Amino acid sequence: MTPPLTDFSRLCIHTITTRPWSLKECIDNYRDSEVPAITVWRQALEPQGAVESGRMLRESGLRVTSLCRGGFFPADTDAKRQAALDDNRRAIEEAVEIGAPLIVLVCGAEPSLSLSESRRQITEGIAAIADEAKTAGVRLGIEPLHPMYADTRSAVNTLGQANDIALELDHSHVGVTLDVYHLWWDPSLEAEIRRCGDAGKLFSFHVCDWRFPVRDILNDRGLMGDGCIDVRRLRGWAEDAGFRGDIEVEVFSTEYWGMDQQEWVERIKDAYLNHT
C-alpha cells in the first residue's frame, strides 16, 4: 500500500489550475500558501512576455517544474507542419527564459489523417526539435491523452504508444509525462509505467480525478478524491518505477475556477495530503 504524503515538498500547481489568476497572482499566492513549485502554461506568459516572466519566477523562489505546452505536430500541409515546428522552437526559448527544465508535449492530431499517419508525424516532429531542446537543456515529455481527444488533441492515447515513440527516438531528452486523468483506465498501465521507468523515461506526473458523470470532456476534471481514480495507487506505481519528481496538480474545471481561488488552493493542499 502506498503511504500518504506527509508534507508539501513535492507539490506543484499548474497555473491553469488557478486560471483566474495572472502569473503574478499565481506566484504570490502559491508562495504565500507554501506551495514550492509551479508549472507555467504559455498563455500565462503572454501579458508580460517570457523575459519578464522569467525574472518574476526567479525572484519568487518558486521551483519551475515545467512549461505547458508544446506539440500539435500533425497537419495536412507542409506549411502547417512547419508552423508547428516553429512554435515548438519558440516554446524551447520560453522554457529557457523561465528556467523550465521540461516542456510537456500535447502531441496533436489531424482528423483528416489516419491516426497512424498522425503518430508518424508526431514522431518526426519530436525528432526534428529534440537536439535543439537538448542544446537548450530542456527535456520533452510526451503526454498521452485519453482516447476521447484522439480527433484533434492527440493521436497518442496510451502510455504504451508514448513509450514506443520515446524508445524509438532513443534520445536522452525525450521521455513521457504521465497524467492520471488520461491513463487511469488502461489495463496495461502498471506495466507501461514500469517500462518507461526502467528506461529512465518517466519525466513528469500529473494528478487530478475523473468525476462521474463527466459534465464536460475538457473543463470538468475533479480534484483528487472527487472521483474514481485511485491516485495514490498510481503514484505508488510511478514511485516503484523510480519517479521522485514533483507531483503536479492540473485541474481544468469551470466549477473550481468560479470559486475563491485562495480557498481553492487550500482545498488542493488538503486533497494532496489525503488523496494523493
Image (spheres, rainbow, N blue to C red):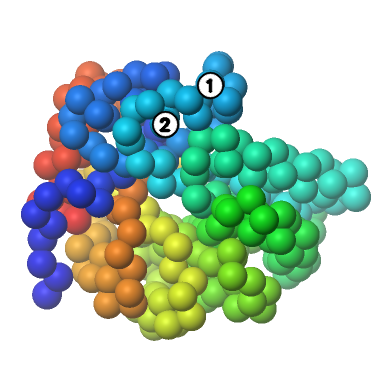
Amino acid at the residue labelled 1: Glu
Query: Relative to the observer, which residue lies in front, 236 or 36?
Result: 36
Query: Relative to the observer, which residue lies in front, 98 or 218?
Result: 98
Q: What separation in Å lies between label 1 and label 2 (alpha carbons)?
A: 10 Å
> Which residue in the structure is indicated by mark 1?
52
Where residue 193 appears, as percent x and y from the top left, is: 40, 75
Say which quarter of the image contains residue 263. top left
Q: Residue furthest right?
A: 78
Name the quarter where the N terminus is drawn. bottom left
Where residue 252 appears, as percent x and y from the top left, is: 39, 37
Amino acid at the residue labelled 2: Arg
49 vs 239: above or below = above
Name the quarter where the C terminus is drawn. bottom left
> Which residue in the structure is indicated by mark 2?
58
Say which quarter of the image contains residue 195. bottom left
- Is residue 264 something one can see in this rendering? no
In the rendered view, does 262 fall on the left or right side of 142?
A: left
- Is residue 199 something one can see in this rendering? yes
In the rendered view, does 87 fall on the left or right side of 202?
A: right
Q: Specify few, some or many for label 1: CA neighbours under 10 Å numbering under 14, 14-19, or 20 or more.
A: some
Q: Say which residue appears at 69% left-offset and 60% top-offset.
A: 130
89 vs 1: above or below = above
Circle nearer the N terminus (1, 2): 1
Where residue 58 appears, as percent x and y from the top left, is: 41, 31
Can you tell which mark lies on residue 231? none
Q: Secondary structure at mark 1?
A: helix
